[in-house]
Amino acid sequence: MEESLYNIAFERSVLSSIVFEPSQFDDIETQLSVDDFYVAAHQNIFSVMQDLSARDKPIDEEFIKKELLKRKAFDENALLDILTANPISNTSAYVEEIKDKALKRHLLTLTTEIKRVTVEEELPGDEVIDIVERKLYEITQNSQSSDFQDAPEVTTKTMAYIEEMKARGNAILVGVDTGFAELNKMTTGFGKGDLIILAARPAMGKTSLVLNMVQNLINNGKGVAFFSLEMPSEQLMLRLLSIKTSIYLTKLRVGDLNEEETRRLKDATDAMHRSKLFIDDSSTVNINQLRSKLRKLKSQHPEIELAVIDYLQLLSAAGTKDRHQEVSEISRGLKMLARELEIPIIALSQLNRGLESRNDKRPMLSDIRESGSIEQDADIILFVYRDDVYLYKEEKEREKEALKEGKEFISQYVEKDEEDAEIIIGKQRNGPTGHVKLTFQKKYTRFVDTPTYNKTEIVYENIDMSDAEMEVTPNVSMPTI
């Protein structure tokens, strides 16, 4: 291997400095890993140092030698070279150089891996891309190191955030606008780095609700990325145009428009042409491909403020067949991607049909399919519930039973153009849970604020602030601290 990819003298100097001043090890260990060393003997010695430190044993010549002999990895010449090397007082520059060369070696190894899976194993192109994306992500994650921020630094950033909020006039909305006044009050908007799960049973309108949010953002010149794994882009656009024009969706689908509606449609399509909406309707995409696509799109279009995945259960994770592990990888991957790109990501989710056997069919957290990891990783979980959907289903069941028994059936169900809807906040990491009332306009597949509704039911005692979840970015657009 070319000498530009390693520096043996630097490796010896760092290891020598640890032996002569073991107090440095804790700091160096947070920056270097065993694989960052090129020489195998150096890898063994650093690994022994890690083990000795973990057991509160002295990191000196005698203990290092003893452990190496126990592992049958003792190299007398290598240890002698380290002990005779000149220790350095400031190791940071040396550590940085070792990490840089290790990164280059890992990238070179990746090129060899690409050749192997492409030429020798003749894997399909999409599988090769999955492997490369995953390996590259692992390399970049391992090459990054972070350290504690002291209280003055954190306090300064937090005060800057408070001053920014004060300059806004103590506005309720500090994150991305949901498009609904009461929901904004409950959440203060969707924050940078938030993973939002929007869940419902089929026909409740979860896609319609998220399209309302999308429409609001693009109307205000914001950028949105939409991954539609279930619905073609043309159908999504039809729904958006119905929301924007107030033309019945059924009329748009068959092109049955009068002159006034045609004019409104033209104005709406002209506006859509200028919008910053990006739709990917690939029916099969895994978390690695989605991550790659969204990173690329965000770098090309920094104005993107929201990403939507419709829906989560259609995503897959490369390299695993265990569904529980797969969902865990997907939900955690989406959360980390939201933090990395500093945008909220909304993932739509199906609910288990078991809830329909309950008297009260309002969803709960446990109703989410594969709910464990999803519930843990999400910052906000929203449920869409419309009682009329179940009233209609029950009426149809009664009609079916009556016809089976040869009885006359007189329907008591009155179909409405506008139905009451509830958005249930089942979890909010840094805010209250509760219910928000909306109105669903069926012919436009559109949700709107309920004009006469001015009170939100808030349950502050249900705020979920468990230790396992405190590590994640808050749902307001706080600075990254």
Image: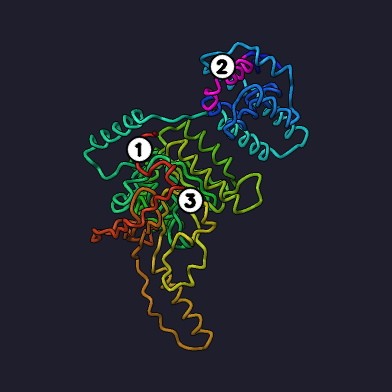
Q: Quadrant of the N terminus?
A: top right
- Mark 1, other Cα within 10 Å: few <14 / some 14–19 / many ≥20: many
- Mark 2, other Cα within 10 Å: few <14 / some 14–19 / many ≥20: some
Q: In the rendering, at what x and y percent does residue 271 appear?
A: 37, 41
Q: Amino acid at mark 3?
A: Gln
Q: In the rendering, at what x and y percent does residue 383 appear?
A: 41, 58
Res 94 label = 2
Q: Amino acid at mark 2?
A: Tyr
Q: In the rendering, at what x and y percent does residue 8 appear?
A: 66, 15
Magenta segment, which residues? 10-26
Mark 2 touching mark 3, by CB under 8 A?
Answer: no
Above/below status of 7 relative to 122: above
Q: Earlier in the sequence, mark 3 or mark 1?
A: 3
Res 376 label = 3
Magenta region includes residue 92: no
Alpha carbon separation for disc pair 2 and 3: 40 Å
In the image, which is nearer the foreground, mark 2 or mark 3?
2
Alpha carbon separation for disc pair 2 and 1: 35 Å
Left or right position of 181 against 350: left
Prevailing SS of the magenta stretch: helix
- Residue lying at 53% horizontally and 43% vertically, measured from the top left: 333
SS state under label 3: helix
Above/below status of 347 relative to 4: below
Left or right position of 403 against 138: left
Residue lying furthest right in this view? Answer: 120
Q: Amino acid at mark 1?
A: Met
Residue lying furthest left in this view? Answer: 169
| Figure quadrant of residue 457 | bottom left
Alpha carbon separation for disc pair 3 and 1: 21 Å
Q: Which residue is mark 1?
A: 478
